[in-house]
Image (cartoon, rainbow, N blue to C red):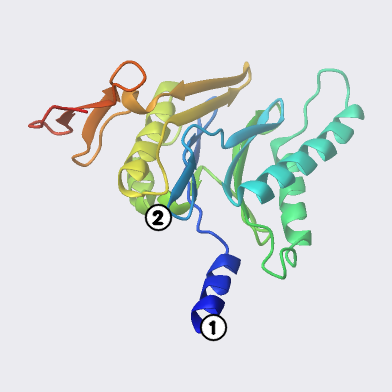
Amino acid sequence: AKAHMESINRAQEAPKTGTTIVACEYAGGIVIGADTRVSTGTYISNRASDKMCNLTENVVMARSGSAADTEAVAGFVRHHCAQREIELAHGETMEVKQVARILTKINYENKNANNGTGLGCYAIAAGWDEKFGAQVYSCTAGGNMIKTSWTTDGSGSTYIWGFLDSEFKERMTREECEKYVLKALTLAMAVDSSSGGCARLCTVNKDGCFRRFIKGDELERQLGEIHFKSGGGLGKGVVYGEKSGGGGLLIFF
């Protein structure tokens, strides 16, 4: 009976989830990025998911926490923004701060959801508008909204705060900022088992929103990782090559 109750309690526990999301502003816009691994405890349920979504044409949300909660919140925010944009002049877009406030308000007003634990929605809202330019906002599950030059969240974020702080530069170029965000993601993916797969980047500036997808075997290897690439064809397995930093091995499965 005791073992039975323990199994029931384990089943009722919320599964541990993980991710890494990063955002940074540069001279003419913002770059926001995320890994693509979705994990449920020790099980990888999706290795190529998209953890970023457009809330408006000029604002992107990167999601971490509960996939169900973050997708629901994103849907509500898009709905409210669409209603608001009806009132705007033709061609005018919402300010990034307004969109981030809607996201934060939904989180704050649902702090007692999920049997009192609140929504598991830890998000970054970033974008560009004509009035204030590039902006990055960290929006926590408790309803905090913090404007910052760069930020990160998710299980992998704890490993890269030092890198992001030491390597950040004011008024970076777009190329420098994209490299900065991608390097942070690959570092987190190298040490955090809940982050991995591929990487997605989204750049937003006055010209629009531009997405980029980087496959796992195209990512720079970090911290002694063994490089891998597709073996080419179903059933041919994976080819492991040289480790980062030189000296390695080659194994065929």
Of 105 and 117, the residue lying toward us = 117
Residue occupying image coordinates x 43% and y 36%: 170
Q: Amino acid at mark 2?
A: Thr
Residue 138 as seen in the image, left or right of residue 71: left
- The quadrant of the image that shows the C terminus is top left
In the rendered image, residue 47, in percent from the top left (x then y), is placed at 46, 35
Q: Amino acid at mark 1?
A: Ala
Indicate which disc, 1 or 2, sits on the residue closer to the N terminus: 1
Residue 224 as seen in the image, left or right of residue 166: left
Residue occupying image coordinates x 46% and y 40%: 37
User: SS class of the residue under badge 1?
Assistant: loop
In the rendered image, residue 211, in percent from the top left (x then y), is placed at 54, 21
In the rendered image, residue 161, in percent from the top left (x then y), is placed at 39, 51
Residue 179: assigned label:
none
Where residue 158 sits, quadrant-wise, is bottom left
Q: Which residue is at the far front?
A: 1
Residue linked to disc 1: 1
Residue linked to disc 2: 158
Residue occupying image coordinates x 79% and y 43%: 76
Instruction: Sort mark 1 into few (<14), some (14-19) or many (20+) by Cα contacts within 10 Å.
Output: few
Where residue 178 sits, quadrant-wise, is top left
In the rendered image, residue 35, in percent from the top left (x then y), is placed at 46, 37
Of 154 and 103, the residue lying toward us = 154
- In the depicted structure, whether residue 3 falls above or below residue 110: below
- In the depicted structure, whether residue 117 falls above or below residue 185: below
Rounded to the nearest angstrom, the CA distance separating label 1 from label 2 is 40 Å
Question: Does residue 34 show up?
Answer: yes
Mark 1–mark 2 contact, CB under 8 Å?
A: no
Q: Which residue is at the far bottom?
A: 2
Name the mark nearer the viewer: 1 or 2: 1
